[in-house]
Image: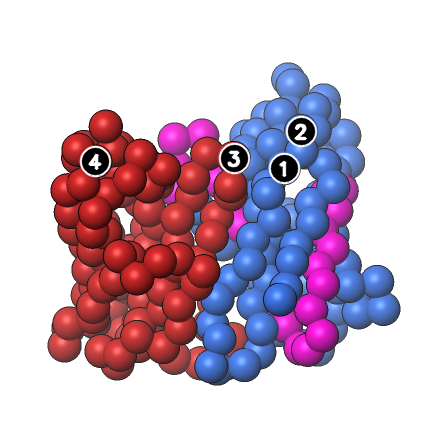
């Protein structure tokens, strides 16, 4: 069975601070990796994704994530956060096995950006 | 392009009743997924439908079931409702590709009293 760990449950930053949210997963095979964001009052939105190739992927709104295979990690980063980045962030992992298309989600990280 | 839509937004049922939740995928998407987001339990995979067939099921009892219609919309049925079924039920859709990136709807909030 696969599992996803998000180490930070609640992060508070000031505007312009840099952000890094940790995500580690356990799974024996090849995976697709995702970060989703849920802004207050809105539904889950896909922020960025990694399938293969360059391990550094860029998403919307200046976010990026790096896949480190040896560490089973897919950390989310942003050089300078804005108040509008206040949201809950979820890391998700899905096996590359068409027989089992289930995303496993981490417990989420609530990011609060103070103006 | 319209996103994933779900109805109803809210649903209140009594323990023992049945609930039916509906989902319309993004146009062109053939796969529909259902997830449960219960307080304290996070997002958990329920079911995957593709081309009208149930393809994969999460660790939920058989009273959670559903179907997918020829137009790829889907229905989730929860029978013999229990208090712990109270949760936000999310539907997602994807293309039938190996990457299967999933796009989520706004959810249906089910409350069981």
Cα distance in 3D space between marks 2 and 4: 34 Å
**What is the chain identity of the residue bearing mark 2?**
A
Residue B8 vertical position relative to residue B73 in the rendered view, above or below: above
Mark found first going from the N terminus, 2 or 1: 2
**What is the chain identity of the residue bearing mark 1?**
A
Cα distance in 3D space between marks 3 and 4: 21 Å
Residue A47 vertical position relative to residue A27 in the rendered view, above or below: above
Q: Quadrant of the C terminus of chain B?
A: top left
- Residue under the image location 35 percent in, 50 percent down: B90
Q: Quadrant of residue A59?
A: bottom right
Range drawn in magenta = A20-43
Question: Which residue in the structure is indicated by mark 1?
Answer: A109
Q: Secondary structure at mark 3?
A: loop
Cα distance in 3D space between marks 1 and 3: 13 Å
Residue A34 makes an appearance in the image: no
Q: Which mark is residue A10?
A: 2
Question: Which residue in the structure is indicated by mark 3?
Answer: B40
Q: Which mark is residue A79?
A: none
Answer few, some or many: residues within 10 Å of disc 2's Cα (few below 14, many 20 plus, some between 14 and 19): few
Residue lying farthest to the top in this orientation: A115
Which chain appears blue?
A
């Amino acid at each position: 069975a696969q599992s996803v760990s998000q180490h930070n449950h609640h992060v508070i930053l000031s505007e312009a601070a840099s952000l890094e949210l940790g995500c580690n997963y356990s799974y024996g095979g090849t995976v697709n990796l995702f970060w989703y964001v849920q802004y207050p009052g809105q539904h889950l939105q896909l922020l960025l994704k990694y399938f293969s190739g360059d391990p550094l992927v860029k998403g919307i709104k200046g976010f990026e994530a790096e896949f480190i295979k040896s560490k089973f990690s897919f950390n989310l980063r942003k050089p300078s956060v804005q108040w509008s980045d206040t949201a809950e962030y979820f890391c998700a992992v899905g096996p590359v096995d068409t027989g089992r298309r289930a995303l496993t989600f981490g417990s989420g990280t609530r990011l609060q950006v103070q103006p | 392009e319209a996103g994933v839509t779900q109805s109803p937004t809210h649903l209140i049922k009594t323990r023992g009743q049945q609930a039916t939740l509906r989902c319309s995928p993004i146009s062109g998407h053939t796969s529909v997924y259902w997830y449960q987001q219960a307080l304290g339990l996070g997002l958990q995979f329920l079911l995957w439908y593709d081309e009208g067939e149930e393809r994969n099921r999460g660790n939920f009892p058989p009273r959670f079931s559903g179907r997918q219609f020829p137009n790829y919309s889907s229905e989730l049925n929860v029978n013999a409702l229990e208090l712990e079924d109270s949760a936000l039920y999310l539907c997602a859709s994807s293309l039938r590709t190996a990457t299967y990136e999933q796009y989520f709807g706004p959810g249906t909030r089910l409350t069981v009293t």
